[in-house]
Amino acid sequence: MSQSARAAGRFASLAVLLALVYVMPRWLGGSALVYSTFVTVAIFSVMAYGTDMVLSYLGEVSLGHTIFWAGGGYVAALLATRSGANGWATAAAAVAVALALAVVLGLTTLRTREFVFSLVTYAAAVVAMEITFNWAALGGSDGIIGIPKLMLPLPGRALSGSSSAELWPVALALLVLTVAFIHRFRRSRLGLAALMVQMHPDLAAALGLDPRLVRLRVFVISAPVSALAGWLYAYQRAYVGPDMFESYFLVLMLTAAVLAGRRVLLGPVIGTALILLQQNYLSLGGDGDRIVLGLVLAGILIFWPQGLVGLWQLAARRRRAA
């Protein structure tokens, strides 16, 4: 079979898979809860991909990605409520603001590594939360309410999102574009350079790579990913507030990134889906769900850092050896 035929076959398979995913909420009953769950899984998966880029390809733990997540939501809320900007404009502004914030934070942490890097990024997130909590222009402790429904003008028509069912196509499209971006990044020179810097820093330096520049570039391009998730989340719940900086979102990002396994293309999607399925359908209550989330993260990091994929591979090897 020729290469073009194989590529066409893969494209057709992906198209069928996406079509099945698109209609799945309807097959599962089409209730508001089902659609809300699917939209939230898509949004939180995109949010986790931003953190996963830094964790999996730089080997660093960013505790400050809630800045970009919340920043995307606040930018959307401010522009939509105060200037009537449509979704395209608010998304572009969210990306621009996230890039600017990432450059500042990236340059600030340029000389830090590992534990110090994590502490500095976490401190930055705490400062950002206090600013939004106390600054009246950002809604203060009450946040910003009354965000209008998402409007995405297109030639001849416009996509709108006033309910989870209407937001589902937009959320799925954002998730698909994010996965395609991550797939491209994995194969790019920057992605390969990031892995080289993480795993073989001496060899990377010998090959002429500047580790600090590589880290900065990966950190900066990871920010808009989480920001776009925050952008759509603002429209989903028609409200943003300082709660977007809460540790729940940070722990969820990290758990989703490691639960399935690092550098697994669909890992954050699998991790997010498992987490939200437990919280929506096997809930132990707000505090109970947070405890479960924390225990899962700690358990994976302590006992099986390879994640669920690693467990699957171990089981497969044992079956072959039996």
Image: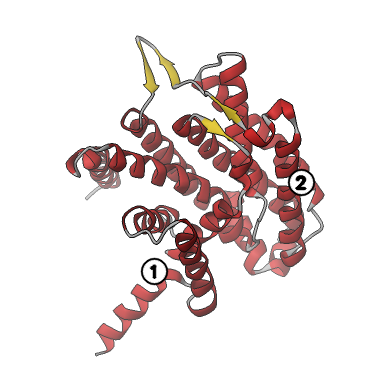
Q: Of the residues tagged 1 and 2, which is closer to the observer? A: 2
Can residue 97 be spotted in the picture?
A: yes
Q: Earlier in the sequence, mark 1 or mark 2?
A: 2
Q: Residue 67 location, x and y as percent? A: 66, 43
- 41 vs 60: above or below: above
Q: Residue 59 location, x and y as percent? A: 63, 63
- 162 vs 295: above or below: above
Can residue 305 be spotted in the picture?
A: no
Q: Separation of disc 1 and disc 2 at Cα?
A: 36 Å
Residue density around tag 1, few if under 14, some if 14–19, many if 20 or more, within 10 Å: some
Identify the disc placed on residue 32: none
| Residue farthest top in this picture | 156
- In the rendered view of the protein, which quadrant contains the C terminus? bottom left
Q: Nearer the viewer, residue 153 or 34?
A: 34
The type of colouring in the image is: secondary structure
Q: Residue at x 73, y 66 (%)?
A: 115
Identify the disc placed on residue 309: 1
- 155 vs 76: above or below: above
**Would you identify the image quadrant in which residue 33 lies?**
top left
Q: Residue at x 64, y 41 (%)?
A: 242
Say which element carries label 2.
Answer: helix
**Would you identify the image quadrant in which residue 274 lies?**
bottom left
135 left or right of 314? right
Residue type at mark 1 is Val
Q: Residue 248 location, x and y as percent? A: 55, 54
Residue type at mark 2 is Val
Residue density around tag 2, few if under 14, some if 14–19, many if 20 or more, within 10 Å: few
Identify the disc placed on residue 127: 2
Q: Residue at x 69, y 63 (%)?
A: 204
Q: Nearer the viewer, residue 204 or 266?
A: 266
Say which element carries label 1.
Answer: helix
Determine contact: label 1, label 2, CB under 8 Å. Answer: no
